[in-house]
Image (tube, rainbow, N blue to C red):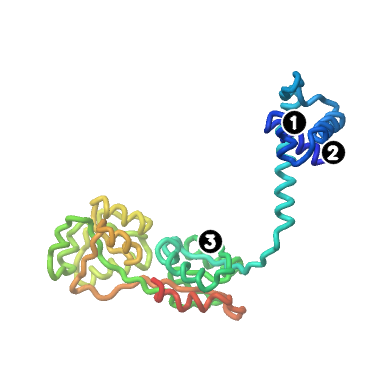
Amino acid sequence: MNINNIEAFVYVFLFGSVNRAAEALYLTQPTVTARIQTLERELGAQLFNRDGKQLTLSDKGKQFLPYAQKILQTYQEAKIHLQKTPIVKRELTFACVPSVSTHLLPNILVQFQKQFSDVSMRIFTGHSSEVLEKVLNKEVEFGIVRTVTHPNIDSFLFHADPIELFVYPGHPLIKQENVRLHDVYREPLIFFEHGSLDYFMIYSLFETMHLNPNVILEVDSMETAKKMVMAGIGISFLPKSCAQNEVKEKHLFQIPIKDKPPLARDIRLIYLKGEDRSPFLSFFMNGGNAFI
């Protein structure tokens, strides 16, 4: 079956006449008519009803039309694909925890694209244990996680994310000077990731001061904790990167605490020991704090 004959059939349908189809195809009217007739003979079916100069699709023509259009589309796509000059692109594949992909990566990747414009990226997200597994299985070149340990893994501090207290607009602590932990522990507190290092680090902060924090809600993610604070349910200690946009927009306010020691959430790059390092690893080693 000749593709030109199918093309003539579709064009006659689209333009409503042989004359207009011939003009669009830069062919003569007899040539287009001959192609339609050849196609009808091959199919053993009349595709158009002819009433003088007016052409309308026959029932068989209506049945054949979607097939003809699909054949033409597939042919055109294949032609375009084959005529393209192949572009060989380098690829970077890595995995990270969701908080990193949401809050830290965007600014870094802007700089990465400027430096490596010919590199495409695939990024997987998951819990630290899932990222570790992908690194161990060589599914990714490296991972970005909370602190994890494994005998086959080397790690590098990617970013130290300060943990600070955040409150909702209008909270009394915003106007209070010299806020101390004693001013905070009775407030309705929202803790995230029960059992995590962050959880124990913040809880221990109050324990060392012999204070029993008023934890009214525990949630499994910092994003949820942040939303709860913005809703006015309570206040929360959160990684600074998690709340920086909301602080700019004044949906959240950071409260300096006079007697709080520096707390930070360590994010680390992990990669296999004894393997050739990813050619892009040095960029991320230098970029964790530089571009954030």
Query: CA–CA distance between discs 1 and 3?
Result: 54 Å
Quadrant in the picture for the N terminus: top right
Q: Position of residue 87 (x, y in %)?
A: 67, 65
Q: Label 2 is placed on what type of residue?
A: Met
Q: Label 3 is placed on what type of residue?
A: Phe
Q: Position of residue 282 (x, y in %)?
A: 51, 79
Q: Secondary structure at mark 2?
A: loop
Q: Secondary structure at mark 3?
A: strand
Q: Position of residue 194 (x, y in %)?
A: 35, 60
First in residue order: circle 2 vs circle 3: 2
Asked whether the residues under the numbered discs 1 and 3 touch, taking CB atoms below 8 Å apart as contact, a structural biologist would say no
First in residue order: circle 2 vs circle 1: 2
Looking at the picture, does residue 25 appear above or below residue 157? Answer: above
Comparing 175 with 57, the one in front is: 57
Q: Label 1 is placed on what type of residue?
A: Val
Which residue lies at the image location 37% right of the left edge and 63% below the top edge?
195
Write down the quadrant of residue 60 in the picture: top right
Query: CA–CA distance between discs 2 and 3?
Result: 46 Å
Query: CA–CA distance between discs 2 and 1?
Result: 20 Å
With 40 as the anchor, is 230 left or right in this view? left
Mark 2 or 1, closer to the camera:
1
Comparing 127 with 11, the one in front is: 11
Asked whether the residues under the numbered discs 2 and 1 touch, taking CB atoms below 8 Å apart as contact, a structural biologist would say no
Q: Position of residue 141 (x, y in %)?
A: 58, 71
Write down the quadrant of residue 204 in the picture: bottom left
Looking at the picture, does residue 58 appear above or below residue 250? Answer: above
Comparing 171 with 5, the one in front is: 5
The residue carrying mark 2 is 1
Which residue lies at the image location 79% right of the left edge and 33% below the top edge?
29
The residue carrying mark 1 is 18
